[in-house]
């Protein structure tokens, strides 16, 4: 059994209370920071930990905090992205329901590191229970002196509010999320300037994911080297909450070291696959990552290992498919989602995704033609010219389908039907 850091206070039927969180060391890091650390000390500790953003982009969190200039204007903002609208991804909801004060403390410490005065948790509308939990626990934290003016009798002040999203996947993109918060259409904005220079209402803004913020109190309490040592690989750092679903016996969220092997996650934690099922492929990090075929069943689940085979760890949401699953049909399902959720700002994404969806549906329904495969390849290349990272992520399943399972696509075309039906 690996050490539980982020989910150490997880209960089967309720959230951890403030007292339970404090008994496990909660808010000790905040007290130490406000007493003994400058904001630059916190930045350096997070930088030394090699904490990479857990929302999918894997950007170094310490570097993000350091990119807020000393002479930057005020007020400054700290935003927690709890939008989590990628299919198959549910770790942040589990984390909020397990231990909300861990997230709150992480936001406060990161806010101090960037000298932010205002904090916002941006949460998807379907997470209403999580939003209510956070609002209640934020008020409890405020009453205990952890939020508001002069936190714990220090010179630092921060307020946190919960903002419910209007409910679009594109709002999970950093700059689109800021536009949504400002009441604008949630179109992404291409830097420069970067959000830490000119973000929410033109002010310096740091935005990170729920799981990322939850790591920070533990890094402060135990040190950056301790955090690195939690991983099983040299390049990794920390634990990761892997959400696993699909053809497994025990779908759920499991906190494991970065670098744990995919086969171990499936067999030792997710209860293996159902009787009669054999591993065919998985999406290793959510709907915007590529299919990982059988030959990588023992791969280390780490950023570098997956990058080396042309894939991404993403959010760590593993969706498992067996030999009875039609991957063309699965890809149709995914592209339907992405085509619907595009903001429509740029032509490659707005026009390209519906075109790809139409070709895939034709193939799945028995109307595919041999020329549809090169047409799909051409369209995938074109979508890399889109304005933001939405389209390249959306076509990752299509690209990997054509790379690893072209014979399955060809079989649909040759038989003029889906061979799995």
Image (tube, helix red, strand yellow):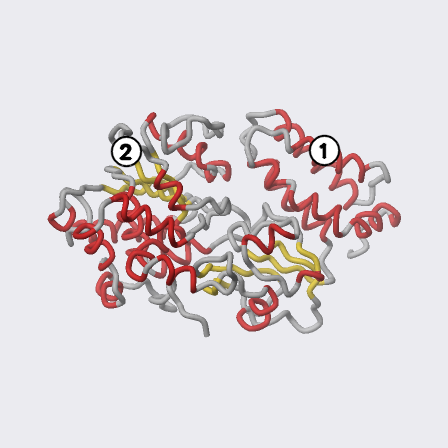
Q: Residue 72: give x, y in percent of width and height.
A: 29, 29
Kindly check if marks 2 and 1 are in contact, taking CB atoms under 8 A apart as contact: no
The mark tally for this picture is: 2
- Residue extending farthest left: 153
Report the front residue among 194 and 393. Answer: 194
Report the front residue among 142 and 3. Answer: 3
In the rendered view, tell whether residue 239 sits above or below residue 74: below
Q: Residue 307: give x, y in percent of width and height.
A: 60, 50
Q: Mark 2 Cα within 10 Å, few/some/many (few <14, many 20+)? A: few
Q: Residue 140: give x, y in percent of width and height.
A: 20, 53
In the rendered view, tell whether residue 59 sits above or below residue 254: above
Q: Is residue 157 left or right of residue 394?
A: left
Disc 2 to disc 1, C-alpha distance: 45 Å
Q: Residue at x 21, y 52 (%)?
A: 141
Q: Is residue 161 left or right of residue 4?
A: left
Name the disc covering residue 211, or none: none
Q: Secondary structure at mark 2?
A: loop
Between disc 2 and disc 1, the foreground one is 2
Q: Is residue 104 left or right of residue 188?
A: left
Name the disc covering residue 70, or none: 2
| Picture quadrant of residue 255 | bottom left
Q: Quadrant of the C terminus?
A: bottom right
Q: Residue at x 69, y 44 (%)?
A: 398
Q: Secondary structure at mark 1?
A: helix
Q: Residue at x 73, y 62 (%)?
A: 323
Of the image marks 2 and 1, the number of the one nearer the N terminus: 2
In the rendered view, tell whether residue 179 sits above or below residue 224: above
Name the disc covering residue 379, or none: 1
| Picture quadrant of residue 301 | bottom right
Q: Residue at x 39, y 40 (%)?
A: 64
Q: Residue 40: give x, y in percent of width and height.
A: 28, 44
Report the front residue among 36 and 365. Answer: 36
């Amino acid at each position: 059994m690996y050490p539980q850091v982020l989910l150490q206070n997880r209960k089967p039927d309720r959230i951890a209370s403030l007292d339970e969180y404090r008994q496990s060391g909660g808010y000790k890091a905040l007290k130490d920071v406000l007493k003994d650390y400058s904001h630059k000390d916190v930045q350096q500790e997070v930088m030394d930990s090699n904490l990479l953003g857990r929302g999918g982009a894997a950007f170094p969190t310490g570097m993000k905090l350091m990119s807020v200039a000393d002479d930057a204007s005020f007020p400054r903002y700290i935003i927690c992205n709890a939008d989590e609208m990628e299919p198959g991804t549910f770790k942040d909801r589990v984390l909020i329901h397990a231990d909300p004060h861990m997230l709150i403390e992480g936001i406060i410490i990161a806010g101090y590191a960037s000298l932010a005065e205002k904090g916002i948790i941006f949460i998807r509308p379907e997470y209403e229970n999580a939003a209510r939990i956070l609002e209640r626990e934020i008020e409890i934290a405020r009453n205990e002196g952890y939020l508001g003016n002069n936190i714990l009798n220090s010179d630092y002040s921060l307020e946190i509010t919960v903002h419910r999203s209007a409910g679009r996947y594109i709002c999970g993109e950093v700059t689109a999320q800021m536009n949504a918060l400002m009441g604008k259409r949630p179109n992404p904005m291409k830097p420069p300037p970067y959000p830490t220079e000119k973000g929410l209402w033109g002010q310096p803004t740091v935005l990170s994911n729920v799981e990322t913020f939850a790591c920070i109190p533990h890094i402060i309490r135990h040190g950056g080297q301790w955090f690195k040592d939690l991983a099983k690989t040299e390049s990794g750092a920390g634990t990761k909450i892997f959400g696993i679903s699909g053809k497994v016996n025990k779908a759920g969220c499991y906190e494991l070291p970065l670098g744990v092997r995919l086969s171990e996650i499936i067999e030792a934690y997710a209860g293996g696959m159902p009787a009669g099922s054999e591993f065919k492929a998985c999406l290793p990090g959510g709907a915007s990552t590529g299919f990982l075929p059988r030959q990588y069943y023992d791969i280390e689940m780490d950023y570098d290992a997956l990058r080396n085979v042309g894939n991404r760890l993403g959010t760590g949401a593993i969706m498992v498919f067996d030999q009875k699953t039609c991957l063309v049909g699965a890809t149709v399902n995914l592209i339907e989602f992405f085509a619907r959720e595009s903001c429509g700002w740029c032509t490659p994404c707005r026009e390209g995704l519906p075109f790809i969806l139409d070709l895939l549906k034709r193939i799945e329904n028995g109307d595919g033609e041999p020329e549809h495969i090169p047409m799909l390849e051409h369209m995938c290349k074109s979508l890399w010219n889109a304005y933001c990272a939405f389209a390249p992520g959306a076509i990752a399943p299509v690209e990997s389908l054509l790379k690893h399972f072209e014979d399955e696509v060809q079989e649909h075309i040759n038989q003029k039907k889906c061979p799995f039906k």
